[in-house]
Amino acid sequence: MHELNTDQLQELFGSDDSDFDDSFPEDQTRLDASLGSGSPAQTSEKFDRIPGLRLLRHGLSHSVQTQLLDTIISAEYFNGTANNQAMHFGDLPQQFQDIGQWAKRDTDLLENIDRDPLFDQAILNLYRPGEGIRSHVDLQKFDDGILIISLLSSCVMIMTPASEAQKHATNYSEEGKLDDGVPILLRPGDVLALVGPARWDWAHCIPARLIDNMDGDIIQRGSRVSITLRKLKCTTADTIELGHRQ
Ligand SMILES: O=C(O)CCC(=O)C(=O)O
Ligand SMILES: [Fe+2]
């Protein structure tokens, strides 16, 4: 997919602070048909150093990426400049449930994860060029088996062995040492799974920078949107929270 400049992004996500109506568009297209037939199952890439880390490159077709982005734009979470993160708790929008079911049924991303519902929490992150996310292990209140979907633009995520503090942190304030980290290039349409050690014992971050260097390839960051699907260990009521990423 092509990458967007700030003006194009404003056109997409809006530039004013119009009233947010606290709901996700209900007339979403079901993604089922566009996600493929499941035969043959899609096989993800594994990483020797990080058991449980799996990356399905080009997992989502252009059409599915576009449908997801259309729905996110219609939800108007990222209108104005204040918010770059939105969290859904409870019953997830149908398209996110479709992605979860597809990942379980048609790929090997979530091989050891068996539960119902598969996911009951979704975070949407918007990264404007130069923005990132601090090194963290996702909070302990979320169960094993996390799925991260990349849309719009590429970036390099860095995985580092987690410190004890990071494993039990209640926020993302701990900065990891990134020098000996494992860089993972995430492109639009890629789907990353964190299971077992990759989820509990490794921290991940996206350094705040405009350019990534992946094995000598220089990658200019555009604006990126990610969808992270998780399962809370304890269920909560359906809510949506908007905020600013740490
Ligand atoms: O945006 C991403 O790719 C990762 C997001 C993430 O790690 C998180 O929200 O916990
Ligand atoms: Fe995370």
Image (spheres, rainbow, N blue to C red):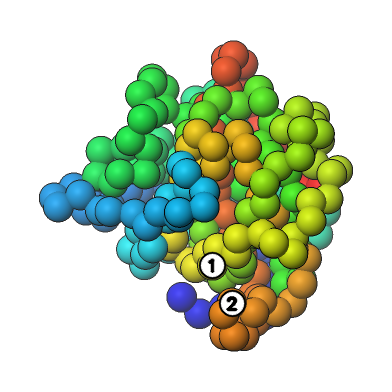
Label ID, residue 177 = none
Query: Are the residues at dot 1 and dot 2 in contact (C-beta closer than 8 Å)?
Result: yes
Taking 158 as reference, is 3 left or right? left
Query: Residue 53, can we see it?
Result: yes
Q: Which residue is drawn at the image coordinates 37% and 64% (left, top)?
A: 58
Crowding at mark 2 (Cα within 10 Å: few <14, some 14-19, many 20+): few
**Which residue is at 30% across, 44% downward?**
108
Q: Helix, strand, or loop for circle 1?
A: strand
Quarter where residue 10 is shown = bottom right
233, 26: nearer the viewer: 233
The disc placed on residue 214 is 2
Above/below status of 92 relative to 148: above
Q: Position of residue 230 (x, y in %)?
A: 54, 33
**Earlier along the polypeptide chain: callout 1 or callout 2?**
1
The front one of 163 and 56 is: 163
Taking the spot 48% from the left edge, 37% from the top edge, the residue there is 195
Q: How many marks?
A: 2
- Which residue was labeled with disc 1? 185
